[in-house]
Image (tube, helix red, strand yellow):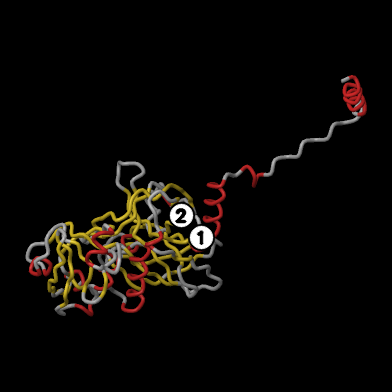
Amino acid sequence: MKARLRRVLNDEAGFAGQARPEPTPPNDDLLLDAYSRAVSAAAEKVSPSVVYIEVKHRRGAKGPETAGGGSGFVFTPDGFILTNSHVVAQSSKIAVTLLDGRSMEANLIGEDSDTDLAVLRISASNLVPAELGESKSIRVGQVAIAIGSPFGFQYTVTAGVVSALGRSLRSASGRLIDNVIQTDAALNPGNSGGPLINTRGQVIGVNTAVILPAQGVCFAIAIDTAKFVAGRLIRDGRIVRAYIGLAATNIRLPRRLVRFHRLPAESAVAVASVEPESPAQRAGLQVNDIIVAYGSQPITGIDTLQRILSDDNIGLRSPLTIIRGTEKLALEIVPIRAKSSDK
């Protein structure tokens, strides 16, 4: 005990007259928790792809010119940009500003008010396209990050979670947009058209709407829907759709039902409502019917059904496989041309 005390006293005496070593300053990277690092890294990855959109509107040939704005993001190296239809609808001039400060005029390639999506194109070098994710990988509760220009404050980042999937939202044209993502990542006017991303910096949705005066109830068009619409707009400049007249939601099927009917997938589409005098009603579809196949194509979700209902199937009689209760039934349906396609 005495020997240990002498060693301690000697050690303390050794520091007499000497400055004690300064503590190591904290590393900022270590102070950031995993959540902060994930949000920061994702925002840094995608921000060069995000654009600020300024729009001029003119009502009539001699009407006053008004200004508006929104967001968008580059998704191809050759300058195609995704945004909302309501941001650029009835525009007389569209200008795009990149993160590096470059500003240029953009051309409207096409818009689809039924899904509130539009494609622009700019001519610029050294563009950074955003990486697009997949709708099937999205999970309720995962981190969701929105980037946009609310009220003109460019490249604003907000974060939250995916609150719900499979929501329906009525577009400006009156059509229900199915498979919409609900998030509590704060959105405001000007965020419209900007990307909703995951922590890997992949775009999982296109921000489109806020329910006011509610807080934290915001919506984004699912990325698989956006991919399909963008492809058709680039190819044709518009979307021509087949119409069957129903609203639906994505569901998971009980495994015993899948095994009993030997279904190819454990997900399908449940009918939420049927329009009167529609092809769906004439085919005999009822609320709560589960659509598992259209022709030979398994229906695993609303996106799959929407892709099938293209102009190729207008007027074409096709078998429709459904589950009603526990019974598997085969119906026949003949889609018609959607009225919005005639605009």
Instruction: Say which residue appears at 41% left-offset and 60% top-offset.
Output: 137
Is residue 166 shown left or right of residue 278? right
Viewer-proximal residue, 85 or 41? 41
Identify residue type, mark 1.
Answer: Val
- The picture quadrant where one finds residue 20 is top right
On residue 28, the disc is none
Badge 1 vs badge 2, beta-carbon distance below 8 Å: yes
Mark 2: which secondary structure?
strand
- Can you identify the residue that label 2 sits on? 147
Residue 46: mark in rendering: 1
Query: Whole-Å distance between the Cαs marked 1 and 2?
Result: 8 Å
Residue at point 36% right, 57% down? 67
As rendered, which of 314 and 62 lies closer to the eye? 314
Please tell me whether residue 10 is drawn above or below residue 34 in the rendered image. above
Front in this rendered view, residue 263 or 15: 263
Q: Name the secondary structure under disc 1.
A: helix
